[in-house]
Amino acid sequence: MFNKARKAVVDCLIEAMLTRPNDFVLSELTMKDTKTEITYWIGNSFFDAGINSPYRLKFGFTQGYRFHKGLTDLKAYQTIQKTCSEVADATA
């Protein structure tokens, strides 16, 4: 039962990262969803990934792997956005 709950949480999280990537603030070890005020732990490994605040829920290896794949896409999107805005500012 816990695995289904973890999968549902990660499914919703991945969908949110894809549909509203600008609502997420990344730091070295955490990711915060500014819309829901939920903080996710992203440091260390797939085993340690999970919700950090307002409650704790570890995703486990499989869901942690899925989460980190989505996180990689989010980081790529945010890097591209930042680069494009820097180029636009430099040419203006």
Image: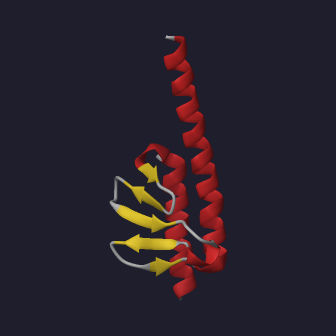
- For the view shown, which residue lies furthest in the top direction? 92
User: Residue 8, percent across and down?
Assistant: 52, 72
- Rendered view: 74 above or below 65: above
Q: Is residue 25 above or below residue 41?
A: above
Residue 91, compared with residue 53, is above or below; it is above
Q: How many marks?
A: 0
Please identify the quarter of the rendering in which residue 53 is found: bottom left
Residue 61 is left or right of residue 31, and the answer is right
x and y percent of residue 69 in the render? 66, 60
- 57 and 44: which is toward the camera: 44
Which coloring applies here?
A: secondary structure
| Residue drawn at 59 percent across, 56 percent down | 71
**Depth order, front residue of 18/78:** 78
Q: Is residue 18 left or right of residue 46?
A: left
Seen in the picture, residue 31 relative to 85 is either above or below; the reply is below
Q: Nearer the viewer, residue 2 or 54?
A: 54
- Residue displayed at 54% across by 65% down: 42
Instruction: Give the residue at x 54% y 68%.
Output: 10
Residue 12 percent coordinates (x, y): 50, 63
Give residue 54's position: percent from left, percent from top: 33, 72
